Amino acid sequence: MHAQPLDARMAHIEGVVQQIGERLNSIDRRLDSIDGRFAQVDARFAQVDVRFAQIDTRFNWLIGIVVGTWITTILTILFHR
């Protein structure tokens, strides 16, 4: 008599464990899709960083030209004879 209730309990536990496994697999798939989205966002940030580096370089050149022009103009005014 004890064998049937034990078998039924074991079958129930196996079913519960199987359901837990399926739920964990679904969570894993969702986390993988979230990781994929973060990878796309990271790639976009890398592109933006490259663009800002180009802008920084151009800004430095512009500041150099402006300062050079000011210095040349001031020196021309001071030493004009």
Image (cartoon, helix red, strand yellow):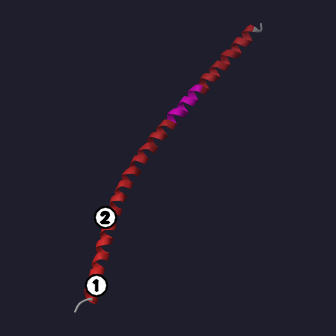
Asked whether 66 falls inside the magenta stretch, the response is: no
* Image side of residue 76 versus residue 51, left or right: left
> Does 47 sit left or right of 73 as displayed?
right
SS of the residue under disc 1: helix
**Which quadrant holds residue 20?**
top right
Q: Residue furthest left?
A: 81
Tag 2 secondary structure: helix
**Front residue of this view, candidates 81 and 20:** 81
> If the image is split into quadrants, where does the C terminus sit?
bottom left
Q: Which mark is residue 75?
A: 1
- In the displayed structure, does residue 31 sit left or right of residue 6? left
The boundaries of the magenta stretch are 21-30
Magenta-span inclusion, residue 29: yes
The image quarter in which residue 79 lies: bottom left
Q: Residue drawn at (74%, 12%), measured in percent from left and top?
A: 5
- 1 or 2: tag closer to the N-terminus: 2
Residue type at tag 2: Arg
Q: Residue at x 27, y 80 (%)?
A: 72
Disc 2 target residue: 58
Picture disc at residue 60: none
Helix, strand or loop: magenta stretch: helix
What kind of residue is marked 1?
Leu
